[in-house]
Image (cartoon, coloured by chain):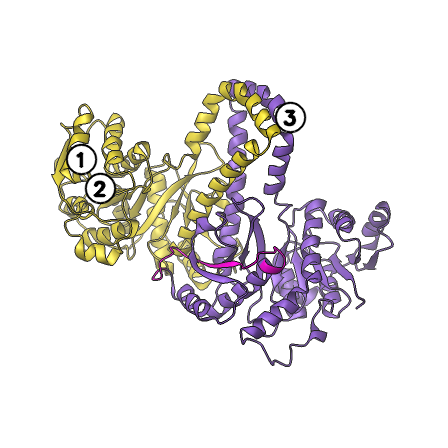
Chain colours: A purple, B yellow
């Protein structure tokens, strides 16, 4: 693999693929001019799209495959029957060292199954996890949360590993000097929670090395309060909490809309507000950006030997470009190398023969 | 216990007790003119407050105790040492048949421990649960969710019982003709989730009788979508999800505020909006009411032989009045009798000698 930044793309994954994949890559080039792309999928559909975007043809290699994974495919079926799918080939490109990272907006379960199968877990990591970052009350301050659904049942050891992965992400990608790592629980007192979180708390308290500082148990409302940088939880709780948060944001938006247009008086008042809203527009747009799921798009599968980023299935091109951005940042800072170093300091995974830089997919 | 409606109040529980308790009862009297109250706590503090509210003295009996449970007390300590606390005596009044229900804004853990100890579980219910109702996208349509933290670990049987309790609440209190009951999970497909939810799904599918219709697995974003009436989950997930939802609502509020006042342009635009907002005020106020946590105040401890309602600790008098309203509604429809009938139809708890109307604390 040449030096630089090579990003592998599942051209057929997502509700609006391949359009948003090609346009997203084109948008991402503005921030990452050094990036090159390998895109997998139907050449008849993707070829013309590449040509439409000036300058893209020179940096995007199209590899044809007629197969793709649908959003309805079961992960096990996709894994068995999808060896020639655009998703699988895109992951393979990371596995065989052609690309530094892969981005897909396709079927999450299939992507996770394929990525685990092809890329394998980093030495010292027993269970890879899905992580994302979200806005908090504190301006400019996001929070990383994991696992978001890769593992419905977790051991204390798994949670310790998630804390390490999330800590490295917060420190290296979000530039938090000393990430505050919290364990999601039903209360902050020591006796709270089930055996898993209590066991994880013991491991975290006893850990000689952590990429951050363990601050103890945190509760559901701490996720958005800005008082914690990394929220660690099992994939069952994390997945439900993430979707509940997304649902609440949608609920509030729809309530405001219902209110503004529910009565003639409401409508008239709303119309009177328009000049004010127009003047305040830049502020509203910055709010929209802070809340836009596309802005926070890009969930990472952490703990694999290769970098794999999942975009929201319904994302637009800007959102897909953001997911590419997450992949690019993780590749450029050599995320997996940093994790491996961290695990070694912690006495986990060190000396394992499988841990060698040549097997890593991030560039040297 | 005389016919009618007697409500027992923990006069000293909550951040703003006893003021909000006394004023809340006074406000609740407007909707429930038949209600009588027994209030427990410091007579020097509570006595003058009762006198301040016209007409309250005639319907509110004050019973003095100098003891009270603080928000820092551990449940086990409160249970052992708080036998004379206002909280405990208020619960005792339900246990000994003097009152139909008890309302407290005090320490949740202590209230739950005492209520379980004094009131005991209904026959057929192995684990009482905490439930609340929340707004959804569909106007006028709330959702009941349980358990919210009484049981961090649950069996499939516990979840089946929660479904029954929630179904009766939705049908009888929220007047849903046939409540749609969903199990909270990481996906809607049958193979998703851990053994507990899968086991609970089997029980719910096999249940000959349910106070509603089991619709299968639901996800985090379904809680607010209005597509389900009762969301059943374990207390670990439920507690974290509830607090995450509250945190998200606060986050969005604070982001809007930051946006409106973050720049001079934003401020100027906001000022220009004021006349419009004034005209749309009734709509905004109805939104505020729909979102106000005080409006949705009152979590029920369901599955106990007596009715016990927990108010938010930080609530105001209006919120406390709403919690009293939940207690009153549950007492008036004889919630526990309805649950007992339901459990009998389901073949759970029937024929148990402990199940007799005389032991029930709701009026005949």
Q: Are marks 1 and 2 on the same chain?
A: yes
Give the SS element for disc 2: loop
Asked if labels 3 and 1 share a chain, the reply is no
Residue at the spot 81% in from the left edge and 67% down from the top edge = A2
The chain to which mark 2 is attached is: B
From which residue to which does the magenta span run?
A171-192
Name the foreground residue: A343 vs A110. Answer: A343
Q: Earlier in the sequence, mark 1 or mark 2?
A: 2
Q: Position of residue A3 (x, y in %)?
A: 79, 66
Q: Is residue B261 left or right of residue B22?
A: right
Estimate the spatial distance between the alpha carbons at disc 2 and disc 3, rounded to whole Å: 50 Å
Local SS, label 1: helix
**Residue B186's disc number:** none
Q: Is residue A210 above or below residue B141?
A: below
* Total tally of numbered discs in the picture: 3
State the mark number for residue B12: 2
Q: Is residue B263 left or right of residue A95?
A: left
> Alpha-carbon neighbours of circle 1 within 10 Å: few (<14), some, or many (≥20)?
many
Tag 3 residue: A278
Which picture quadrant has residue A148?
bottom right
Secondary structure of residue under mark 3: helix
Residue assigned mark 1: B46
Q: Chain of mark 3?
A: A
> In the displayed structure, would residue B211 be above or below residue A206?
above
């Amino acid at each position: 693999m040449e030096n630089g930044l090579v990003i592998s793309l599942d051209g057929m994954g997502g509700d609006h693929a391949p359009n948003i994949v090609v346009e997203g890559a084109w948008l991402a080039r503005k921030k990452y001019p050094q990036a090159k792309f390998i895109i997998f999928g139907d050449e008849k559909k993707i070829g013309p799209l590449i040509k439409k975007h000036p300058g893209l043809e020179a940096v995007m290699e199209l590899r044809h495959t007629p197969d793709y994974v649908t959003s309805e495919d079961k992960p096990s079926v996709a894994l068995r029957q999808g060896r020639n799918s655009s998703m699988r080939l895109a992951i393979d490109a990371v596995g065989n060292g052609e690309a530094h990272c892969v981005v897909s907006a396709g079927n999450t379960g299939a992507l996770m199954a394929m990525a685990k199968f092809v890329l394998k877990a980093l030495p010292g990591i027993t269970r890879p996890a899905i992580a994302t970052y979200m806005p908090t009350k504190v301006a400019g301050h996001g929070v990383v949360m994991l696992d978001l659904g890769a593992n419905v049942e977790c051991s204390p050891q798994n949670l310790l590993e998630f804390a390490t992965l999330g800590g490295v992400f917060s420190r290296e990608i979000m530039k938090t000097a000393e990430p505050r790592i919290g364990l999601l629980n039903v209360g902050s007192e020591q006796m709270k929670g089930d055996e898993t979180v209590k066991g994880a708390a013991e491991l975290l308290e006893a850990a000689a090395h952590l990429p951050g500082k363990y601050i103890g148990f945190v509760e559901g409302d701490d996720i958005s309060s800005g008082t914690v940088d990394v929220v660690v939880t099992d994939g069952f709780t994390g997945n439900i909490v993430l979707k509940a948060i997304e649902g609440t944001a949608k609920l509030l938006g729809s309530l405001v809309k219902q209110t503004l247009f529910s009565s003639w008086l409401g409508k008239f008042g709303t119309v009177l507000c328009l000049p004010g809203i127009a003047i305040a527009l830049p502020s509203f747009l910055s709010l929209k950006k802070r809340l836009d799921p596309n802005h926070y798009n890009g969930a990472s599968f952490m703990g694999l030997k290769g970098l794999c980023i999942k975009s929201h299935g319904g994302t637009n091109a800007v959102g897909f470009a953001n997911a590419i951005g997450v992949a690019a940042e993780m590749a450029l800072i050599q995320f997996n190398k940093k994790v491996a170093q961290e695990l070694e300091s912690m006495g986990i995974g060190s000396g394992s023969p499988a841990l060698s830089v040549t097997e890593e997919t991030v560039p040297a």
